[in-house]
Amino acid sequence: MGRWATVTVVDEKGRRHSMDVQADSSFDAAHLFLVGAKNWQSGIVPEPPPMPTLQTVFEVVVDGKVHRVEGAALQRWIVKRREEMKGPRGYLFSQRPTLDNPT
């Protein structure tokens, strides 16, 4: 079981959007923020978090320590994990979204 982390991104207006997740690493936490943002965007929410892109910088706080995860590095991590993971866990992981370039 992972540890609790708070993941924060800043939108184009300078507003901070945070999400608490339980993750195995700072990259996993950033990826779970992406999953939550994609799911949130599809629902009816007055102010969903910004959609992360390759240029997004994720601030991940775990046990009082701050870690920075850049979007491009997260995308490389996602691709690598998809290649490495096998079985049911690998299948479930492959269903998670990836980052897109901004349009």
Image (cartoon, rainbow, N blue to C red):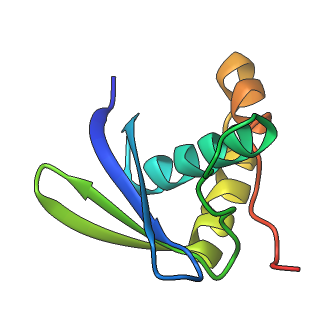
Check the image and report above or below for 87 versus 62.
above
Nearest to the observer: residue 49 or residue 3: 49
Residue drawn at x 75%, y 48% is 83
In the picture provided, is 33 more to the left or to the right than 102?
left
**In the orientation shown, which residue stands out farthest toward the top?**
88
Image spot of residue 10 (x, y percent): 48, 74
Horizontally, is 47 left or right of 100 in the view?
left
Q: How many numbered circles does the render carry?
A: 0
**Where does the image place residue 13, in percent across and percent down from the top left?**
54, 82
Residue pictured at 48% horizontal, 47% vertical: 28
| 39 on left or right of 47 | right
* Residue closest to the far left: 64
In this view, 53 is above or below 13: above
Where residue 77 appears, as percent x and y from the top left, is 60, 61
Report the residue at 47% width, 56% height from top. 27
Task: Name the foreground residue: 102 vs 78.
Answer: 102
14 vs 8, nearest the viewer: 14
Query: Where is residue 50 shown, x and y percent of the image?
Result: 63, 63
| Extreme residue in the front direction | 46
Q: Give the residue at x 89% y 80%.
A: 103
User: In the rendered image, is residue 23 in sight?
Assistant: no
Q: Is residue 71 left or right of residue 8?
A: right
**Which of the image's four quarters has the N terminus?**
top left
Tell me if I can see residue 40 in this picture: yes
Q: 58 above or below 36?
A: below
Kindly indicate the quadrant of the structure image that contains residue 60.
bottom left
Placement of 73 over or under 55, stated as above or below:
above
Quadrant for residue 69, please give it.
Answer: bottom left
